Image (cartoon, grey):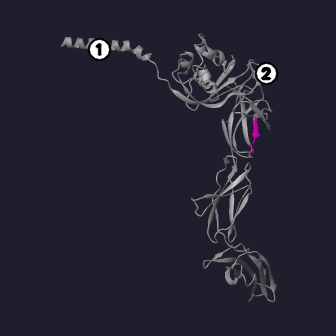
Amino acid sequence: MEKIKNKNIITLIVSVAMAFTMFPAFASADVSPVTAKVWFNASDAERFIMSRQELTVSSDLSNEYYDILEQENGVTVIDVLIAACIKKYGNAFKNASIEERKEDYLDFSYSEAYDSWSVTKWFGQSTFSTIYYINKSMSGSVDQSVVSNGDLIESVYIGESFSDLYSCFDKNSYSVKTGRKFQITIKADTWGTAVKPNAGTRICSIDKSTGLLAVLPGMNTDADGKALISFAKPGTYYISAKGPVTYDSFGSTVTGKITAPWAEVKVTMETPSVKAANKSIKSIKISWKKITGAEKYQVYRSVKKNKGFKKVKTTKKTYWINTKLKTGKKYYYKVRAISGTEKSSFSNVKSAKPKPAKVIISKIQNRGGNILINWKKVKDADGYVIYKKESSKGKFRNVKTLKASYSKKYTSMGIKKGKVYSYKIKAYKIVKGKKVYGDFSGIKKIKAK
């Protein structure tokens, strides 16, 4: 029994020893590369080297292209910089030797004192003054700052004087309507402390293909770094800014430049507000207010409220009269604004029926103890129906139906002197044996004499 026990102990010791012997092999095994999809831009005070590009970055790029083994297993800023060069220079970068990449595009220097890497050549430019921000917070060394999916990495050249500051807008993107002013705010960062750029900092547009900035007339910041701006046409705009920033640095006042901030502005047109009303027995008028930035409008129609819409008119006007319709049939309409390839949302659906126009009472008067009512002829009406109310608390009742060919006036008899009477009239059209009525006229009141 004792021999078996000793044998088990020896087996356990051997197993543990083998595990410890194998552990370094497991620990030093290659870690599979991971990827992250991030946003990246590189800029100085005057332009963008890259203006907000989406990159898919692998964690093994530093080793693959520069033989740099990083301490971190995830995707780092150094990997992002390499991915950005691949995006910008393509095969010229990928097919170059390491020495050619260092000479022409991107190079790094290792510090034993800090056990980290720094950038000495940045997009073909020798530099010792480039800083990096991850989601608007300053990062540490490029090989030890890990990034994640959706992160925004900004690489900023701050000039040889080191007085330039990283800057940013209060938002990465804005959604606004054409012609409407909206507020933006610019902040500059001096080692974690936000400062305001000088008043009069100019808001600029960005040419995405060249990275150059163009000043937008009349769009400048106030003393708080705020500016009200607007765009008259729909589309996607990219904005930046340029100007000086004055701040305290180690007990003295320094003036530098803000480095180009970046934001996307999505400008869409207002949704038309539509009205639909009968114009005649065979036509409907659809109208809407002018939309800022619109070049034209598209009108869609259906005989059903929620489906079956087809485009029936494109016009530059703010109304359209739809003719040759069926009297008494309900039609549904919706409208959207168009500018180039940009489209507004569709308006709410509005409906109307072609029917006789609204009657207009032209005159009401006392005559010979009776009341005489005159109205304007309604085109294509087959007749009119007259309604009368004999007191303020009474109800309107149908007192007469007249054929249109007969008259456009009516004499109301049996009138009591001193009493107030009210009248209203509507026209009708006979369609397949049924009367289709128009809207009532306005109510007319008169005191009998």
> Which sits earlier in the primary sequence, circle 1 or circle 2?
1
Question: In front: 226, or 323?
Answer: 323
Q: Is residue 131 above or below residue 390?
A: above
Pair 1/2: label in front: 1
Query: Which picture quadrant has residue 346?
Result: bottom right
* 183 displayed left or right of 308: right
Q: Which residue is mark 2?
A: 253
Q: Which mark is residue 12?
A: 1
Examine the structure image and report whether residue 6 is included in the region drawn in magenta: no
The quadrant of the rendering that contains the N terminus is top left
The quadrant of the rendering that contains the C terminus is bottom right
Say what amino acid the circle numbered 2 marks. Thr
Query: Which picture quadrant has residue 321?
Result: bottom right
Q: Residues within 10 Å of mark 2 (few under 14, many from 20)?
A: few
- Name the residue at the left extreme: 1
Residues at marks 1 and 2, CA–CA distance in whole angstroms: 71 Å
Q: Which contiguous range is marked in magenta?
A: 226-232
The image shows residue 19 at horizontal and vertical percentages of 35, 15
The image shows residue 408 at horizontal and vertical percentages of 75, 81
Residue at horizontal 66 percent and vertical 17 percent from the top: 104
Question: In front: 362, or 121?
Answer: 121
What element does badge 1 sit on? helix
The image shows residue 278 at horizontal and vertical percentages of 69, 68
Say what amino acid the circle numbered 1 marks. Leu
Q: Is residue 148 above or below residue 344?
A: above
Q: Are marks 1 and 2 in contact (CB under 8 Å)?
A: no
What element does badge 2 sit on? strand
